[in-house]
Amino acid sequence: MKTVLIGLGQAGGKLTAALQSFDERMGFGAVLGAVGVNTAKADLKQLPFETVLIGQDRVNGHGVGGDNELGAEVMQADKTEVLSALDGRVTAEAESIFIVAGLGGGSGSGGAPVLAKELQRIYNIPVYVLGILPGEDEGAMYQVNAGRSLKTVARESDAVLLVDNDAFRSSGESMSEGFDAINEAIARRVGLLLASGEATEGVGESVVDSSEVINTLRAGGIAALGYASAEAAPKAEENINAVMSIVRRAVLTGTSLPDASNADSALVVVAGKPDSIPRKGVERARRWVEEETGSLQVRGGDFPLESNRLASLVLMGGVERSDRVESFMERAREAIDEAKNETREDPSEMWQNDKIDDLI
């Protein structure tokens, strides 16, 4: 599915760069162009594509400090500048637009719903959001931001492909190392999904095309993407069990959103050399996904790719009833309640402390 990427905020810009880099390395050509948008000038400097600094009259290039209401106001005021940067990129060849944003910060979580609504109004192609949930240890403000943003952006976009940071982070990693690894993992998964049916090597028996991705996401709401891979045997009939295994792992342990197997629709993609992909295995895996997700709308197909491995992608649409989403939204509500009930000390009383001597 050929797409244009908009990296919004710090996390969105970095993930967009990783996605574009993966697409270029693999030679897929699914990413037609990319634009980075932020309120913080410093975060735009390292991005390898055109950037747009918004909110200069409000924050002078220093960012919105996690204030997603201010982020939304800034995007509303400066949306024309962002749309101008898309001129010449969203061509007749484009089949979708992806807004890539961290949902816990200020610029990304505030700006994404505003931008999605405006793009929906202008373009006649799907507008998706690749949204990144903050980890459980990232603080109450980030949980509140993400809860409010997710609720709004799911309404204003065609679908939100949701990524849970906690599903990818390894213990012992530094924060920067963790995020770099997460970005690479997400880029591999989403990059392969976008490339399905676009840049194939060889001819598969039942090749996935862009319309199947779009139809899987047509119900809207929240989507998740599972991935797993394994070494391939030379002959297709020897890989039936391998295909079943990687599809199961993609759904049960390899999704971008843990515990999200209850879905309205799904798409099963098996990538690898055409001669190594077993038709029987793909069909058996598709039926298993039907049973696991409870959906009767499960599509399946091949992605011919020159590789000694087999990989499975399972896109699941309509997973907003999953345990992970419900627990996250509950955590966001609790954070909002805590903020409302928090009592602040009278500033004039903090200086009346007999345990501290006056300096003068």
Image: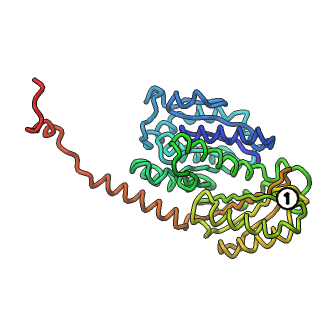
Find numbered disc 1 in the image and state the secondary structure of the residue it sits on.
loop
Q: Quadrant of residue 183?
A: top right
Quarter containing the C terminus: top left
Is residue 244 shown above or below 68?
A: below
Foreground pick, 231 / 204 = 231
Q: Is residue 254 left or right of residue 113?
A: right
Q: Residue furthest top?
A: 360
Q: How many residues crowd mark 1 within 10 Å: few (<14), some (14–19), many (20+)?
A: some
> On the image, numbered disc 1 is attached to which residue?
207
Residue 88, horizontal then vertical, whole percent: 73, 33
Residue drawn at the location 67% of the way across and 35% of the way down: 86
Q: Quadrant of residue 334?
A: bottom left
Q: Quadrant of residue 290?
A: bottom right
Foreground pick, 343 / 242 = 242
Residue drawn at the location 69% of the way across and 52% of the way down: 189
Q: Is residue 124 visible?
A: no
Residue 336, horizontal then vertical, whole percent: 36, 55
Amino acid at circle 1: Val
Residue 163, horizontal then vertical, whole percent: 58, 53
Q: Is residue 40 visible?
A: yes
Residue 80, horizontal then vertical, whole percent: 58, 34
Residue drawn at the location 56% of the way across and 64% of the way down: 320
Q: Is residue 98 left or right of residue 269?
A: left
Q: Residue furthest front?
A: 172
Image coloring type: rainbow
Foreground pick, 277 / 347 = 277
Q: Is residue 305 left or right of residue 143?
A: right
Q: How many badges with numbers are in the image? A: 1
Is residue 7 shown above or below 152?
A: above
